[in-house]
Amino acid sequence: MIRLENINFSYKLNSQHKLWAIRNLSLEIARGEWVTVLGANGSGKSTLSKLISGVLLADSGEVWLAGVNTAKQYDSGWLGVGLVLSRPQEQLIAPTVEEELAFGQENLGLEAAEIRARVEQALAWLGLENYAKRAVADLSGGEQQRVVLASVLAMNPRYLILDEPAAFLAPGEAEQLWQLIYRLNRRQGVTIIWLSQRVEQARGAKRVLVLHQGRLCADEPGDKMFSDSYDWEGWGLELPPLITLSQKLLAEGFSLNLPIFTIDELLSQL
Ligand SMILES: Nc1ncnc2c1ncn2[C@@H]1O[C@H](COP(=O)(O)OP(=O)(O)O)[C@@H](O)[C@H]1O
Ligand SMILES: [Mg+2]
């Protein structure tokens, strides 16, 4: 269980000014949920992802992770929260891909054979089998993003927080990532928190949150979020054309089950 209670967070701009990036935010996420947090640029997504994972501490309010208050977690060890930051360079530390993947597990004190097995599994999941010896610094943004994902997955997180994980990926790669996350959530019960400014990435999410100017503006089941009407424009978000089209077809009398995110889903229902 993840619980945020009345969180306020500010960045200190200078000795006089603060910028409130998260305001009065309360939230509970149960084990095994798949939640997508949508919000325009600057709405507070990255700040929220770091608050949830304990990388940043709130000015006021409390964050509880698996029963531990993140402000007091000094000796509780790893709480099973994997965070994938939106900028891979912020998170990559080792010279080569395989060292990067092994790093977090070495910190967990795992045995060499176990680490080896997990590294290979994670490389395969992300299609990085041929990258083990490559220098991390020489990889493209999309490749680096996959390396970060692989290194986080190699740690077997129980909670996975993905901050714009598809930002540097090609469409095909983004689809593969979605399939992988889907399997982790449905088969292994990994809790997924996927933050994005692209509404189509809420596909599959049972629950959708909207962040606007640091405030939580919506917390709805995915099917409701994309069949009822909401102020997407006011939130600075763009509803995918297929969703708008399927809503209009439904209003015209077609019998459709919303939400519809892909052309195949639409065709199979028409
Ligand atoms: N390190 C920082 N120092 C000062 N302001 C920041 C910092 N990081 C983010 N901000 C500001 O906080 C707000 C929320 O940013 P962020 O959480 O990165 O939003 P998002 O990820 O949704 O784009 C924005 O107004 C941004 O400019
Ligand atoms: Mg961000």
Image (cartoon, rainbow, N blue to C red):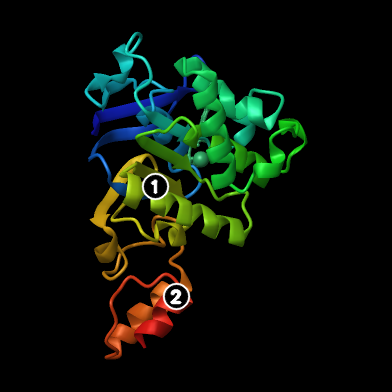
Dot 1 amino acid type? Leu
- Give the spatial CA distance, label 2 vs label 1: 26 Å
**Residue 219 at x, y = what percent?**
25, 51
**Which quadrant holds residue 172?**
bottom right
Asked whether residue 38 is in view, the answer is no
**Residue 34 at x, y = what percent?**
32, 49
Image vertical order of residue 6 relative to residue 182, above or below = above
Circle 2 Cα neighbour tier, 10 Å, few/some/many (<14 / 14–19 / ≥20)? some
Quick one: label 2 or label 1, which is nearer the N terminus?
Answer: 1
Q: Which residue is mark 2?
A: 242
Q: Which numbered circle lies on residue 184?
A: 1
Which quadrant is home to the N terminus?
top left
**Which quadrant holds residue 8?**
top left
Task: Tell me what residue is drawn at x 22 percent, y 40 percent.
Answer: 30
Image vertical order of residue 191 relative to residue 241, above or below = above
In the image, is 237 to the left or to the right of 166? left
Circle 1 Cα neighbour tier, 10 Å, few/some/many (<14 / 14–19 / ≥20)? some
Task: Tell me what residue is drawn at x 34 percent, y 44 percent.
Answer: 188
**Residue 61 at x, y = what percent?**
25, 23
Task: Tell me what residue is drawn at x 24 percent, y 65 percent.
Answer: 224
